[in-house]
Image (tube, grey):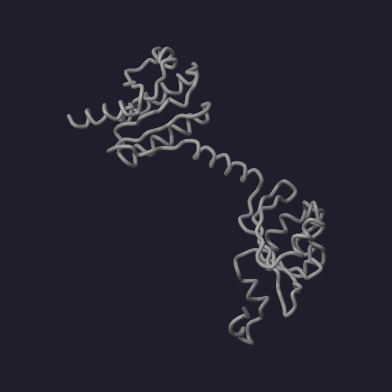
Amino acid sequence: MPAIGEIPKNINALNALDVIGETIIIADSSYIIRWMNSEACRLLSQVAPMYNLSDCKDMIGKSMDAFHKNPQHQKGVMKKLEGTHRTRISIRNQVMADIVVTPILGNSDEPEGYIVMLMDVTTQAAEQQRNEQLIKELSIPILSVWNKTIALPLIGAFDKSRTDHLISTVLMRCAEEKIEYVLIDLSGIKEFEDQIRHQIQMMTDTLDLIGATCILVGISPKLAMSIVHLNSNTPIFSTTHEGLKHIMHMQSQ
């Protein structure tokens, strides 16, 4: 589909691209970098020293091959492009970025050049921290199961870092929604070791301080033999169903 309308004669196309708040790079059909906007120059001036270059200006005139680990593979991808190509790249294992490559097609089937945009640029350390945070959030599902009641299935190993995050997340949820009961499902815990016992004790004591009642459910016979040593008056039930029945009874009084 051809472009619609015309750019006013008093507006330069490159000036228009320059004021866009995205990182925009233009390369020719031979993959030589020919132009970049101010935002791209600002970003790439930080990346340039990783390639023994002074700043973004030194990148002008260089082949994009110089910035790829496997130039031949990249050329193969570029030649096959018929539309926008999106991928995630690592720059010298220090910077991560989402990259969008779009061929500039003229009257022929061959690209006249390429527009390259770097999106969501972040350092490797920040990317790792973000991924770890996402994993933590995904590993702690909190379910609304009844009036002012949430359920927390515990799965996997619990170290101090994960427990602290868990307690912080549950306390915030309890405060925001005025939660009265927290069902902690231990059916995913195979061994009730001293460390886990300590983490559970800390959680029940903390919830008690804010007026929320902790109820342990999903107790297997094997787990029951270990859990008797838990120093708490916390209600304990073998199934979530029994725990919910207890909550309903308490709320009906």
Q: Residue furthest left?
A: 253
Q: Which of 127 and 149 is in front in this view?
A: 149
Q: Is residue 110 above or below residue 87?
A: below
Q: Quadrant of residue 210?
A: top left
Residue nearest the observer in this picture, 250 or 23: 250
Quadrant containing the C terminus in the rendered view: top left
Residue at 50% x, 17% y: name it.
193
Rendered residue at 62%/42% (across/down) = 128
Name which quarter of the figure residue 241 lies in.
Answer: top left
Q: Residue at x 79, y 66 (%)?
A: 31
Give residue 239's position: percent from left, percent from top.
35, 25
Residue 199: x %, y % from top left: 46, 23
Q: x and y percent of residue 222 in the render? A: 44, 15
- Percent across and percent down for residue 160 are 52, 26
> How many numbered markers are drawn?
0
Q: Farthest residue toward the bottom?
A: 9
Q: Is residue 214 left or right of residue 26?
A: left
Question: Which quadrant: the N terminus?
Answer: bottom right
Residues 62 and 41: in front is 62
231 up-or-down from 207: above or below: above
- Indicate left or right for 182 with 4 as reference: left
Vertical relation: 200 (above or below) 88: above
The correct choice, above or below, for 171 with respect to 203 in the image is below
Is 70 left, or right, of 200 in this rendering?
Answer: right
Describe residue 101's horizontal placement relative to residue 208 as left or right: right
Viewer-nearest residue: 164 or 68: 68
